[in-house]
Image (cartoon, rainbow, N blue to C red):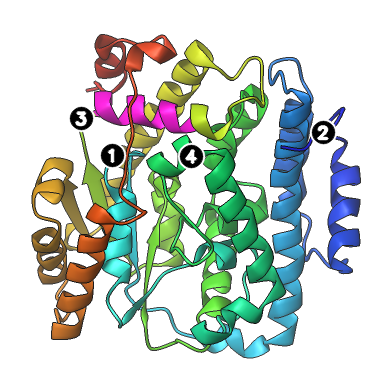
Amino acid sequence: MRERDGVGSFEDIQAAAVRTTGLSDFGDTAYEEGLRILVDDLASPEAGLTPQGNYFHRAQVKSALVGRLMTEARFAQFPEHRDVRIERPIFVTGLPRTGTTALHRLLCADPDHQGLEAWLTEFPEPRPPRATWGDDPVFQALQAAYQQHHVTNPEFMGIHYMDATSVEECWRVLRQTGKSIGFESLANIPRYSAWLAGQDWTDAYERHRRNLQLVGLHDAEKRWVLKNPSHLVALDALMSVYPDALVVVCHRDPVASIASACSLSAEATAGTSTTFVGETIGTTQLEMLSRSWRTFAAARPAYDQDQFVDVDYRAFVADPVGTISAIYDRFDIPWSAAAQQRVKEIDADSRTGKARPAHAYELTDYGLTDADVQVAFTWP
């Protein structure tokens, strides 16, 4: 990983995004508040960034700004995107490491569905024909970066395999407004965390929707399937923007979920911080994730429960295809022969191919006990 002496100022990173793209229209300025707080936090002693960490986190912020610039340009280039209808989208959520990734990818296997591919979560544009992706310089650059990441971080790829073609979480789209719990999963940033906990996410989901309209411009007939643990903290905003949303909620013993989430954060940030390690990872991730789950649990009863389905991790692992079929039945979605075949194929490949998960972790590595987690997830 490359190194830097510091993260730099928000203005410096913003100017770098402008130089990289040759674009200067960020749209409104509401995104600035969160990203300014984030950048200041990243430069603080609490973050404890190493030279590698300075480069890594600066790149994360710059990527959010580049993505915003590029989508503003695409919004102007394709004004017809505003007319694209999004009906009964599926949102997969739950604590990290509860099977959300596998379930999301199986739901996206249906030829009548679409998800956000990794390269289009970074830099949204109307999805080009699949056969042309290899000629796209943005796709080429991101695919090369993922391939290099496979070589230098094999442990991470064993936890969460991805490449530029994989359907991925939509937090990169949400971060265009400066709001993402993804930042909290990568660094010790207490002031940004406190700011984010008090935010209304409606503007983030409104921009999220516009990005889906843009990416799906040529696939308007396909149902969207999205996935992100941060949907837990923003159910009210999600439902205000997508009132007919269908929400799949994944459940797993939180002891296992938190241990695995901590391990993922540790592998993703290895070498980037002297403070975001061990017990600090455990403390920050347990607080954030238990708060997210409480927020979701408090908000859910206000909505039509026919728009929700709960999935048990053990049941899903035991019968992935049957679980997908049950979701289709719950939401009255046609379970076509083509969908069944593709779901079975993707499930088989995930068990034996390069995406097969391989992950070892211990809760005690992060200064936590089973009792700590159980208490955090117990409330009236």
Residues at circles 4 and 3 in contact by the CB criterion of under 8 Å: no
Eyeballing the image, is 174 above or below 216? above
Examine the structure image and report whether residue 143 is included in the region drawn in magenta.
no
Which amino acid type corresponds to the residue marked 3 in the rendered image?
Asp
- The residue to which callout 3 is attached is 253
Residues at circles 1 and 4 in contact by the CB criterion of under 8 Å: no
Looking at the rendered image, the disc whose residue lies closer to the viewer, 1 or 4, is 4
Eyeballing the image, is 359 above or below 363? below
Which amino acid type corresponds to the residue marked 4 in the rendered image?
Pro
Residues at circles 2 and 1 in contact by the CB criterion of under 8 Å: no
Q: Position of residue 213 (x, y in %)?
A: 53, 78
Which mark sits nearer the N-terminus, 1 or 3? Answer: 3
Quadrant in the picture for the N terminus: top right
- The residue to which callout 2 is attached is 7
* Secondary structure type for disc 2: loop
Mark 2 → mark 1, Cα distance in angstroms: 37 Å
Give the extent of the magenta segment.
254-265
Identified at 54% across, 88% down, the residue is: 83
Mark 4 → mark 2, Cα distance in angstroms: 26 Å
